[in-house]
Amino acid sequence: MAKISNEARHLYSEKTGGYREVIEAILQQEKKTVAAIQQEPETPASKRIALVDEMLNLTSYYILLSNISQSMLKNRNEDALNDGRKSLYRGIIYLEEIVTNRVDAPFSEYEDKLIPLEPIDITRRHLLIRKMGLCIDLLENAYGDNTKWRWSFVDMEGRYAAVAKNILDLKEALGNTDPRSPFYETTVYHLRLVEQLLARAADRYREMYELSTHRIEDFRMGTHFLGALRRIYTLLGNREEAELTKKKFDIWSAKLEADLRKKDEPPSKKV
């Protein structure tokens, strides 16, 4: 790695000074908002959603700091990227606190959580989810392929897939699949996105299990996402995809049980 001159560091600091000020302002506002929510649990959903949105804005500024570092210093800013990863996680957690983090669960178990979100129409919800997905993609790209955080993004993407599903009122969405609905196009795009995210999360958890962790819980999470995907297909009356997903779920479940048995077997004695 080439040595970075003091002059280059100074120029980088000057270039990013304004962005750092914005970052500090967002962090201070986050503290105030979180404190207000803790004091008043019935804080309007719009204020909570605004907090999520600000965490995405914060993440984008951290990514920008690293991109400028890559351009000016020929080296990405790992500290900025790590701060971006943390702020993005906080945004996901704040959204989980609103819509829950449930994966393979019937809508009836969490639909009451969406009542406070009724003033926020599906268009605004869809834009928030797309923005979150964009931040995840940009952050992954900024880290590059050879990063120690590669597998941590599996968890992040999985949690993102869950909130993308849970922020959607599935009963309302089913009605909006009528082409006459003013929210038809947005609803269809959101549902397609959810299907893609759930399928990807399932495959990524299976991949992480096979290639990295070998933890049964990671494989089990993959099956949970398949179960959630099947629920969506069933709700929408997509029988063919629901059946294909069920077959995949059954195959994975059989493999999971086999792997569990292997782990429970006592080690063979040497002769």
Image (tube, rainbow, N blue to C red):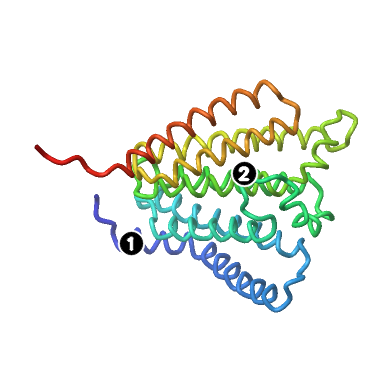
Please give the residue where the numbered disc 1 appears in the rendered image.
Answer: 7
Residue 104, which numbered label?
A: 2
- Which quarter of the figure has residue 180? top right
Within 10 Å of disc 2 (Cα), the crowding (few <14, some 14-19, many 20+) is some
Query: Which residue occupies the extreme right position in the image?
Result: 180
Q: Earlier in the sequence, mark 1 or mark 2?
A: 1
Q: Nearer the viewer, residue 134 or 264?
A: 264
Q: On the rendered image, what quadrant is the C terminus found in?
A: top left
Separation of marks 1 and 2 at Cα, in angstroms: 54 Å
Expressed as whole percent of the image width and height from the top left, the position of residue 220 reads 48, 42
**Picture quadrant where residue 158 is located:** top right
Camera-side residue: 238 or 189? 238
Residue 257, horizontal then vertical, whole percent? 43, 37
Left/right placement of residue 183 relative to residue 231 reads: right
Q: Is residue 204 left or right of residue 145?
A: right
Picture coordinates of residue 45 (x, y %)?
76, 62
Which residue is farthest bottom?
A: 39
Q: Nearer the viewer, residue 216 or 190?
A: 216
**Kind of element beneath mark 2:** loop
Give, as a three-letter code, the residue at label 2: Asp
Residue 189 appears at what percent x and percent y? 72, 34
Number of residues whose C-alpha sits closer than 10 Å to that of mark 1, classed few (under 14), some (14–19) or many (20 or more): few
Q: Callout 1, which amino acid?
A: Glu
Q: Which mark is residue 249?
A: none
Above or below 119: residue 220:
above
The answer to whether residue 54 is above or below residue 28 is above
Q: Nearer the viewer, mark 1 or mark 2?
A: 2
Q: Residue at x 65, y 55 (%)?
A: 100
Q: Residue at x 70, y 79 (%)?
A: 39
